[in-house]
Amino acid sequence: MCGICGEIRFDNELVDSSRLNRITAHMAARGPDDHGIFMQGNRAFGHRRLRIMDLADASQQPMVDAALGLGIVFNGAIYNYPALRGELEQQGYHFFSSGDTEVILKAYHAWGAQCVERLEGMFAFAIWERDSGKTFLARDRLGIKPLYYSVDAKRLRFASSLPALLAGGDIDKALDPQAINFYMSFHAVVPPDGTVIAAIKKLAPGCTLTVAADGSLKQQRYWQLSYARSQADEERGFDDWRDGLLEELRKAVRKRQLAAVDVGVLLSGGVDSSLLVGLMAEHGTDNLHTFSVGFESVNDEQGDEFQYSDIIANEFGTHHHKIQVSSAELLSELPAAIAAMSEPMVSHDCIGFYLLSREVAKNCRAVQSGQGADEVFGGYHWYPPLQDCDDPFATYRKAFFDRDYAEYCRTVTDSFAAGDAAGEFVREHFAQPGADDPVDKALRLDTSVMLVDDPVKRVDNMTMAWGLEARVPFLDHHLVEYAARIPSRHKLGGDGKRVLKEAARAVIPAAVIDRPKGYFPVPALKYLQGSVLDYVRDALHSDTARNRNLYNSQYVEELLAAPEEHITALRGSKLWQLGLLELWLQAQGV
């Protein structure tokens, strides 16, 4: 797990090393163990290293193989690299290091752009060819690792985070009205390749980007999730799906134990993270550390789920760490958590993951986390109403969107009311072939789009802010493909994720499986009161916000007058959504 960056010039000018140094320095938290820069002609590449898979200096990056005429900067973890290395050695390749980075480099030499189809894990990397001048960028299938870029007629620049690109300078900071519509409507999710900064893009998951020496770009998709099923899939019994799922989960968790350091678990107390603990214990993991975080209750809404995480910690004898966060600490750490976001993320548990990661990093360098299970196995409340509905798009929109288009037009000034981009995007996504069942349409959208730019990005940003690697077994692409074949009727029921919960009964106590569904609660950010409300009000009333002229002032005052009355369908604060965006923009100097 690391931070990568680079610049490719198209105008025969040399790369400005000071810009690349600023970008690399901005990602120091992603890779606190080492750093390096490689410059040659019109190209330069930077890297920040977090030692997880291989601790030796031989795996230092940027890595250059002079014999092959290739170099690489890589962020992520390839779990099948030992098998790939063995295959490459049989083809005559010799290795000078023992980690996964060199395996990717030689895989590219052996198999070209198709090498990504053989990689199992999470990754974003850039490989440059010395002789042709070509540069090849790639991102993993589920977008677990980020890759942002900015391109114009003179150069392409990329990095693991959007703020790092801004730190390099020379980028227009104008906002993208279409992305603002997504942020305000689609629960802060801005799909690739957009971001709220119009001049900065992100490579879509499951895609590669080839940059030719003349500056021409070619983007290709190498993986796409399909919900098409065979007749045998439809006829297969529930018990068979359940048993097969448990085996796929065992394999996914076992792969993610591959590391040169101990791997812990972020234990929320829900089924997903509890199941990871049980499977790791089943696998024989020794000295397992688990971590939970809780907040103060507000308006009688409980701010922790320790009663459930305690059950799992006691059942499996883990070294359990409970972190309790006061409202005062929450407010004091909010600015740092917001600054750590690559893009503005409205979900309340960003601050939870930020503070949890701070404490976890004191004890271990890598953790497994349960993100993705709700999207992959149908755990959210908006899936059941989609069964046999006449208008899947309207049903989904009513349950998921933070506001309709009419309210969006009241939220922003006229210059940002540029159309219902989010609504049209979802409508078109639902209409794509490969998912006929209305529930599958939503699962496909949530797994391939929403999951990437909400829960997954949140975990990457907040853990990497403390040099902590997070691994997500529920996003093993073999497991996700298996889950897509399971008919939705086996996922829904029992408050969602039925097939997953029934598989879990063979591993963890029923008291955790049959509990009411929870979420990562931070009540103080749902019911804005006191100092947190003052913090948001000050940001929205600041001269910077007024000069930006993004929000309709009358709408802002309505929310400020009664924040508890303006809650989204997903139980979030509409006022916090506005405040968070403004606070993030100010943190990035926009």
Image: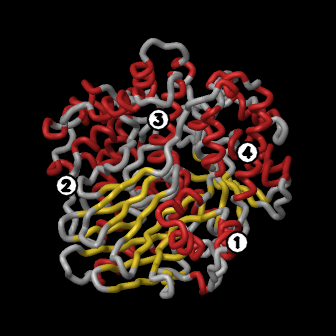
| Closer mark to the observer between disc 1 and disc 2 | 1
Label at residue 18: none
Marks 1 and 4 in Cβ contact (< 8 Å):
no
Compared with 92, 552 (above or below) is above
Q: Which residue is mark 1?
A: 86
Marks 2 and 3 in Cβ contact (< 8 Å):
no
Label at residue 445: 3
> In this orientation, which residue lies closer to the viewer: 257 or 366?
257
N-terminal of the pair, mark 1 or mark 4, is 1
Residue 360 position in % (x across, y down): 64, 63
Compared with 349, 5 (above or below) is below
What residue is shown at x 55% (from left), y 17% (from top)? 387
What amino acid type is highlighted by mark number 2? Ala
Helix, strand or loop at mark 1? helix
Label at residue 174: 2
Residue 229 position in % (x across, y down): 60, 29
What amino acid type is highlighted by mark number 3? Leu
